[in-house]
């Protein structure tokens, strides 16, 4: 289940076409930060999605509607909204239709309805600008899924914008993610050039898979002096098994790697640095003589790439070598209904113009006190101090501390900063933005100060001992985390990378003793708990 439970192959390479406007497409879709949670009678899903949208006169108001595979309204049931080969006059916008034996309420079973005005979406920051909140112009009984989401567009060229949507949430009824490994869905997508207008272009019956494959991996750092370049390990795990073919089926496709240049956790192909161009892969069944192909519990096949080389050459002091690496995977297997999934590789390498010896944040009388030490500074102007509360997504600059190094270069200096604002109950995050004399900048690790909850993060596992199923409750302020479940020999049973969930369920554990390890990325804290299965 990124940045990497973060995979929804939805709206991938959707082609909107009709006889009037042939340049209306949505492509290059990457889904990230996919999280599941149980709901009453179904499953709640939240994700981030990025895709390229063609900009022209027919692609202003954009809508998509998604059904479970077997609930998608077929053309013969009511052809008008699904007339992909006719002209625009023959294709009204989808609405609920009732009355008549040959008609169907086409949107009644759609579990996701979303729309935006591409001309009104902000090009500077994520916001709610441009999100369409009501389907009233077509059918005021249809509820759009917009609450909590934000959207941003980035111009790629005169004909294309990249659209990024954060926290898109929806509910799938009659679906239990803890029982079904993945789910097949089908979408109807359309665009129009004005309020209340008919579709100018559309796509019918695009079929996709939610929840497969899962991507994880890591970066092995370069050696001092640049003698050895960084390498990467990449794992692609799939649950796919074609029920119409004997034996377990594997998947094939290609993947690309990007440095997350602005560290926002989303793949932006026009901004992020391509460090490994499209490379083919094929998953394999488990080979007992090859430990790295050992497949995590619940999956059927794995691709294991070990100690592989980037196309990009990282130079000494290259700031990109310490940033996250994002993965884009496209599955091309015939019969497989998923593609364009996302993931990331954990990167603990640190090649910085300033080498930090320590960075700490502590609480004093309800306020935060920050201290840090440097081993070496090169071309350093100073440090911006930034703060973020648990309820906000953006850091704010609260002060600047000048470098003590003469001319910005020197070794072994100590610094401190007092945040005079009283701490709110809960958690407050701090980081340093180190700024070079030439204006370039990089960030320190993140430290957290907590008030009102007694210190370190805590998790709850219940029942423990158990009969093979356990629930893990995680604090709301924990942010992104990497989770591993190992058996008593240290063998990995299951892994999740970069997830942001409050509840996690562990299923199908055989009798024995397991170790659950959770690393909280923003604070660097790690919790290890023992689980006993009877």
Image: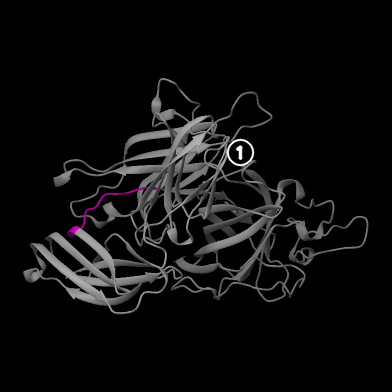
Along the line of sight, the residue nearer the viewer: 432 or 275: 432
* Residue 358 appearing in the image: yes
The magenta stretch spans residue 528: no
* Residue 283 appearing in the image: no
Left or right, 125 with respect to 187, comes to: left
- Identify whether 467 is placed above or below 189: above
Snapshot quadrant of residue 90 = bottom right
Looking at the picture, how far across and down is residue 521, in whole percent? 37, 54
Along the line of sight, the residue nearer the viewer: 358 or 426: 426
Looking at the picture, how far across and down is residue 499, in whole percent? 47, 52
Q: Quadrant of the C terminus?
A: top right
Left or right, 462 with respect to 104, comes to: left
Q: Secondary structure at mark 1?
A: loop
Snapshot quadrant of residue 355 = bottom left
The rendered magenta stretch, by its main secondary structure, is classed as: loop
The residue indicated by pointer 1 is 336
Write the start and end of the magenta stretch as one range: 345-357
- Identify whether 399 is placed above or below 17: below
């Amino acid at each position: 289940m990124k940045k990497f439970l973060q995979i929804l192959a939805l709206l991938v390479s959707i082609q909107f076409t009709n006889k009037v406007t042939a340049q209306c497409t949505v492509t290059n879709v990457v889904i990230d930060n996919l999280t599941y949670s149980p709901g009453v009678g179904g499953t709640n899903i939240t994700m981030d999605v990025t895709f390229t949208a063609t900009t022209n006169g027919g692609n202003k108001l954009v809508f998509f509607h998604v059904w479970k595979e077997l609930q998608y309204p077929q053309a013969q049931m009511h052809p008008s909204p699904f007339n992909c080969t006719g002209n625009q006059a023959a294709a009204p916008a989808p609405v609920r239709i009732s009355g008549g034996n040959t008609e169907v309420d086409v949107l009644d079973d759609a579990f996701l309805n979303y729309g935006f005005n591409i001309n009104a979406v902000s090009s500077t920051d994520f916001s709610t600008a441009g999100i369409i909140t009501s389907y009233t112009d077509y059918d005021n009984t249809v509820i759009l899924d917009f609450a909590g989401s934000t959207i941003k567009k980035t111009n790629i060229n005169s004909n294309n914008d990249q659209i990024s949507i954060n926290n898109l949430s929806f509910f799938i009824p009659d679906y239990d993610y803890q029982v079904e490994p993945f789910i097949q869905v089908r979408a109807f997508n359309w665009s129009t050039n004005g309020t209340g207008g008919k579709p100018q272009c559309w796509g019918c019956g695009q079929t996709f898979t939610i929840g497969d494959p899962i991507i994880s991996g890591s970066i092995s750092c370069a050696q001092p002096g640049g003698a050895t370049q960084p390498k990467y390990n990449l794992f692609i795990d799939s649950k796919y098994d074609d029920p119409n073919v004997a034996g377990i089926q594997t998947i094939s496709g290609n993947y690309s790697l990007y440095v997350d240049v602005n560290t926002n956790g989303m793949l932006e192909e026009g901004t992020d640095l391509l460090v490994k161009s499209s490379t083919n892969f094929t998953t394999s069944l488990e080979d007992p003589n090859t430990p790295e192909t050992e497949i995590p519990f619940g999956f059927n096949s794995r691709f294991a790439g070990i100690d592989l080389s980037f196309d990009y050459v990282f130079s000494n002091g290259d700031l990109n070598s310490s940033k996250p690496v994002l993965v884009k995977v496209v599955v091309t297997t015939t019969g497989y209904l998923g593609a364009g999934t996302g993931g990331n590789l954990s990167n603990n390498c640190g090649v910085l113009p300033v080498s930090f010896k320590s960075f700490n944040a502590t609480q004093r009388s309800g306020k935060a006190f920050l201290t840090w030490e440097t081993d070496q500074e090169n071309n350093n102007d100073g440090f911006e101090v930034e703060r973020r509360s648990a309820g906000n997504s953006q850091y704010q600059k609260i002060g600047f501390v000048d470098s003590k190094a003469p001319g910005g270069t020197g070794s072994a200096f100590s610094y401190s900063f007092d945040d005079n604002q009283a701490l709110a109950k809960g958690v407050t995050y701090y980081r340093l933005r180190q700024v070079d004399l030439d204006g370039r900048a990089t960030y320190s690790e993140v430290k957290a100060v907590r008030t009102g909850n007694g210190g370190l993060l805590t998790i709850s596992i219940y029942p423990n001992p158990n009969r093979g199923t356990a629930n893990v409750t995680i604090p709301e302020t924990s942010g992104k985390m990497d989770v591993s479940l190992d058996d008593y020999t240290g063998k990995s049973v299951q892994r999740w990378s970069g997830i942001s969930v409050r509840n996690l369920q562990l299923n199908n554990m055989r009798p024995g003793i397991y170790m659950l390890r959770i690393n909280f990325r923003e604070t660097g804290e790690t919790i290890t708990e023992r689980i006993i299965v009877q």
